[in-house]
Amino acid sequence: MNATITDSVPDAQGHFGPYGGRFVPETLMFPLQQLEEEYFRAQQDPEFQQELSYYLRHFVGRPSPLYLAARLTRELGGPRIYLKREDLLHTGAHKINNAMGQILLARRMGKTRIIAETGAGQHGVATATVAAMFGLQCVIYMGEVDCRRQELNVFRMKMLGAEVVSVTAGQKTLKEAVNEAMRDWVTNVRHTHYILGTAYGAHPYPVMVRNFQRIIGDEARRQILEQEERLPDLLVACVGGGSNAIGLFFPFLQDASVQMLGVEAGGEGIIPERHAARFQGGSLGVLQGTRSYILQDENGQIQLTHSVSAGLDYAAVGPEHAWLRDQGRVQYGYATDDQALAAFSKLARLEGIIPALESAHAIAAVMEQAPKMAKDQLIIVNLSGRGDKDVAQVAERMRL
Ligand SMILES: *Cc1c(COP(=O)(O)O)cnc(C)c1O
């Protein structure tokens, strides 16, 4: 593939081709410029990078293992399947990679208060964790519906000393939580940093979050070369906003032999309002600071979304994914709720690993792809998080 894909995007204004950019109220333009400057300075600063590596290693638990799922491999009868074990990180998902990066940045900027939005609660927990660790005040916005379906994470955030604001507007899920967080940020921006949880939003968030998450792919690349002495044939990751997927994919983008598959939430099938697969029923639009693929009606009203997994239940996808799809560099598919639940059980019973429902979407795609591939091929699938947060919900659906 052509090197310009990763060298030229995003441009200085945060555009990934026709996607990305910065669509925010006037009052947020200056803070975003400041954040951009401070971030790129930090990125070049060896001291910042050293501090980040220190905490990623000693607090977060990196590097995460790249584990050969031998029984899943045998069961599917195709390529060797490796799991990138982000589920083993402190707090149980990849979200902490980005939360750690951003809180170190917030400290550099002299901010004393942290806010964040959360869907499944994993990003809220990661943020509350790093805020507690550095003694910063922390407020987490979470939709009322998500508070209910992810109650365990609400308790965790509260135990970590965060204030959890249950958002009752609209669909009462992630989109509304982001709106409230942005409203808070506009009002309190002088001393508050907004730790956005995915590769989404106004520039510089998509590129910054991607760069904090690319450690997943950097490690996976090193690990597979060590263990198999060659590159993988296929990378698979679930796509909510897109941070765990871009984190795995990015360091392999120049490797033409490596195929990539992003998996969106197919919910109950591709029927309006019953899924969250933006590349299936979506179109170009602007939502919450950026231009990308969005599930919207003919009047540009944001459609309702549905997924069994709160972390994938969002009407828009990160702008870099829209760009990579246009380039034909990454393929995007979807898994339905039922497929994700089947994959959830399969991984638990075959490998002794209970995955997050989000990650189970990626496993479902592997179950579909692997039988079509050769035995001497290699798949790496990102196990973005562990399923502890989901067991009550799954038990109810399985009538356990
Ligand atoms: C939040 C979350 C996701 C979805 O977010 P991305 O930014 O698309 O990675 C996926 N898996 C887990 C475990 C999550 O917590």
Image: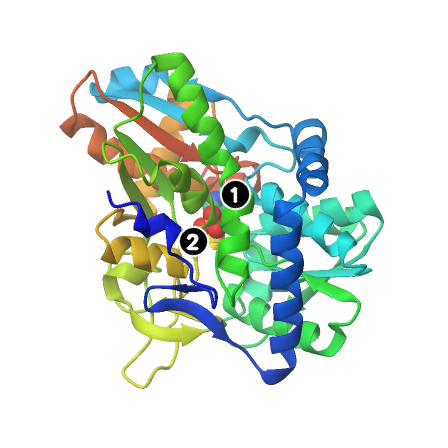
Q: How many marks?
A: 2
Q: Mark 2 CB in 8 Å range of ligand 1?
A: yes
Circle 2/circle 1 CB separation < 8 Å: no
Q: Name which residue lies at 80% across and 67% down.
A: 191
**N-term-proximal mark, 2 vs 1:** 1
Place residue 372 in its image quadrant: top left
Residue shown at the point (49%, 55%) measured from the top left:
207
Q: Secondary structure at mark 2?
A: loop
Q: Amino acid at mark 1?
A: Gln
In the image, what residue occupies the spot 66% across and 28% down?
A: 57
Query: Helix, strand, or loop for circle 1?
Result: helix
Place residue 280 in its image quadrant: bottom left
- Front-most of 151 and 51? 51
Question: Could you tell me which quadrant the N terminus lies in?
Answer: top left
Q: Which residue is mark 2?
A: 240
The quarter of the displayed image where residue 249 is located: top left
Query: Residue 55's spot in the image, x, y percent?
Result: 71, 34
Horizontal placement of 287 versus 145: left or right? left
User: As rendered, which of 201 and 398 lies closer to the eye?
Assistant: 201
Residue 214, x across and y down, in percent: 49, 40
Q: In the rendered view, would you say 257 is above or below 1? A: above
Decide if ligand 1 comes within 8 Å of the CB at mark 1.
yes
One can see residue 289 in this view: yes
Between residues 341 and 191, which one lies in front from this camera angle?
191
Q: Real-space Cα distance between discs 2 and 1? A: 14 Å
**Three-letter amino acid code at the position of disc 2:** Gly
| Color style of the picture | rainbow
Q: Which residue is mark 1?
A: 213
